[in-house]
Amino acid sequence: MAKALRGELSDQEQLEFSAWLNQDDSHLQQWTDALEVWEEVGAEQNTTFQPDAEKAWQKFCANVDMPTETKVIQLVPEEPVMTVERQEPVTRQFTPWNTLYKYAAAFVLAAGLAWLGYLQFNSSPAWTQVATAAGQRQLLYLPDSSQVFLNENSTLRYQTAFEGAERKVELVGEGFFEVRKNPEQPFVIESGNAQTKVLGTSFNVRAIKGEPEVTVAVKTGKVAFSSLQGNSQVVLTPGFTGTLSSTGKLVKQPTVQQAGLPWQSLEFKNSTLVEVADQLENYFNVSIEVPSQNVQQCTFTGTFENPDLREILAVLVASSDVNINRTEAGTYTIGGAGCK
């Protein structure tokens, strides 16, 4: 966490940290608490601090019982003095050590500059990709603790570590975003020919492959919705939806369903269990059978946010005189005494 707060995580560490955040809700709570403390303490830090290197060195030497004087160790030993009798003079050329040092320093400097140039022009941020299949929806947390509820048949690509001026992600499909506020690093979503730019808010983006339009519906906060093919842009606030057509036309209009999005919830109002089974089949892409006519007449009322199939089936069993079995092929069967 400390390295994440300082922005010092490597790509591999960032992957492991994101996986840890998504592993358990308590992990996310720990990270949220740490962020709040960091923001409060960080605002009060004294940026004028100047370290006293000499004092720190003396303190270190005292702790390890070492003299503070610097001892010079000769790296190149002097040649021993030898007495040679009647030897013909030999002429040798020596390269001064200071010249060698200059060559070595120049070589190290050139290698360092070459390496920095390579990093500058050849490195690129690592990306992570998450995809959902038919009937599958997934809640995931991004490196900045923003969360995305991804609809079925959708793909989200995001930078493993949000570095630079923007927090950038790419979406194909549909997702509901709750973005953590950070005015100094805007959150940018590219979806088809559309771009959505926010500072911190919650909204839904629909960019289904094959559909001619990209839509953004805002729940809280403010969103700048624009076209990547032109200069057109609209600012969306709660209760409004932006629509970008394939021709580049950008429209702002009131949101039709203010209460929420159909794919984020399931609602049953005095529905028969046959109707319930049909909705669950379409939503979760599963097979559910209700063979008994007595059971078919039973009704059910309930609303589920971010629906989970196991949770809904458990509520059905608890609230009605039914039982639910699953075959090896994966088909669910609702049976029991039924309703009269």
Image: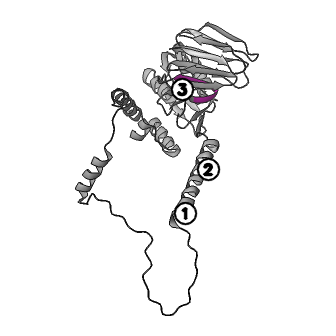
Sequence order check, earlier mark of 2 and 1: 1
Which residue corresponds to the image point at 40% horizontal and 69% vertical from the top-left? Answer: 74
Q: Which amino acid type corresponds to the residue marked 3 in the rendered image? A: Phe
Does the segment drawn in magenta span residue 186? Answer: no
Q: Nearer the viewer, residue 32 or 286?
A: 32
> Residue 82 location, x and y as percent?
44, 86
Depicted 256 relative to depicted 58: above or below: above
Q: Nearer the viewer, residue 265 or 330?
A: 265
The residue singled out by tag 2 in the image is: 114
Q: Secondary structure at mark 3?
A: strand
Give the spatial CA distance, label 3 vs label 2: 43 Å
Magenta portion: prevailing SS class = strand
- In contact (CB < 8 Å): disc 2 and disc 1: no
The residue singled out by tag 3 in the image is: 149
Q: Nearer the viewer, residue 130 or 46?
A: 46
> Residue 282 location, x and y as percent?
62, 24
Q: Which amino acid type corresponds to the residue marked 2 in the rendered image? A: Ala
The residue singled out by tag 1 in the image is: 99
Which region shows up in magenta?
Answer: 168-178
Give the spatial CA distance, label 2 vs label 1: 23 Å
Q: Relative to residue 41, is residue 77 drawn left or right? A: right
* 10 Å crowding of disc 2: few (<14), some (14-19), many (20+): few
